[in-house]
Image (cartoon, helix red, strand yellow):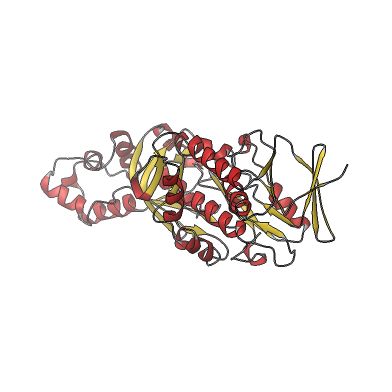
Amino acid sequence: MNAAPYDAIVLGAGAAGMMAAAVAGQRGVRVLLVDHADEPGKKILISGGGRCNFTNVHAAPDRFLSANPHFARSALARYTPVDFIALVDGYRIAWHEKTLGQLFCDGSARQIVTMLRNECAGGGVDWSLGESVDELDHADGQFRVRIGRKTATAPKLVLATGGPSIPQMGATGFAYDVARRFGLKVVEPRPALVPLTLGGDETLFRTLSGVSADVVASAGKGSFREAALFTHRGLSGPAILQASSYWRHGEAVAIDFTPDRAAGWLASEKRARPRATLRSAIGQALPGRLAEALADRIALDGNLADLTDKALAEAEARLSAWPFHPNGTEGFAKAEVTIGGIATDALSQTTFEAKAVPGLHVIGEAVDVTGWLGGYNFQWAWASGVACGKSL
């Protein structure tokens, strides 16, 4: 059977892959877009509660994690949230801004997938959906890909198959396997934007399952003010998901339960309400069940009038930097994205081509670039896809 010739084969019909294929196709490049799923953009469809948090107006390089924090600068500068919003507006897709610069469709995430499919159609992109890549070879400057009973060749191959997060959606480490075959290094992939689990003495906090509070959660160099949620397994909520990307096993996560309280607030409370208890004072700032649990752990009994200012200052300090020691995460099954991936030092930051393997490009989540929660990872998919698509 003769192989069908293309100029470029893109593996992975997610956000980055569809964007790269569309941009290249509209430049006259003959593109084959391949995905083992039976329809494209499955992660897009479930994102943002089905409304797709498609970008963030605050997208900037300092909101992305990578072993090389400068790698993302070029692509993000050349394709910005304003550029993607213009594309969305061109399709008359209604959208709104929620907190912290997050943009969502008013309607359905399917509108974004349909838009990308139409962009691909505008570039004459060929599709191969619902069949896995059975073989992948490279010889004489050509990549040869066998998909079921079909074979295709091209001088350019784009890895856009993402990372292993959300395996129930079909996600795998395929891109890493291919990269290693071609001698590219892979930074240890870990679950990111993921709930944390608690064990040992901290399991008692699981009894607070369903309780949430506005906090500042900190891990490593990351610090985020948003809601934290106690679960039957540990900690979740936006603040925790954000901090999880900076957390490493064995380290603590510090939670400031009283970010709006000025220093000395408990001593002031003692003077204003001397007969109040610590539990009732904390209850002014936090949900009752949480206030009770924290007061029990601090274990200062009696009225505030019976407690020294020093003891109250120590209680304040603990409430503003309460250390939790997670024993793990809920893993790739519950992770929104993967941190780590194919090392950026092997790739061009302008074309995403592998320096040692001409014609091989890597984009999107497969690369060691991970954004914050709230549309940042989609912006990276669009930006890396456009940069790659323009170079094919």
Residue 389 seen:
yes
Q: Is residue 63 above or below residue 95?
A: below
**In this rendering, would 95 be left or right of 45?**
left
Residue 57 horizontal/vertical position (percent): 39, 53
**In this rendering, would 92 be left or right of 339?**
left
**In this rendering, would 111 be left or right of 208?**
right
Return the residue nearer the eye: 217 or 49: 49
Q: Is residue 141 above or below residue 151?
A: below
Tally of marks: 0
Residue 117 horizontal/vertical position (percent): 57, 41
Q: Quadrant of residue 346?
A: bottom right
Residue 250 seen:
no
Residue 119 horizontal/vertical position (percent): 56, 45
Residue 337 horizontal/vertical position (percent): 55, 46
Of the 4 image quadrants, the one containing the C terminus is bottom right
Return the residue nearer the eye: 13 or 376: 13
Q: Of all residues shown, which one is farthest toward the left?
A: 272
Of the 4 image quadrants, the one containing the N terminus is top right
Residue drawn at (29%, 51%) of the image: 259
Return the residue nearer the eye: 298 or 329: 329
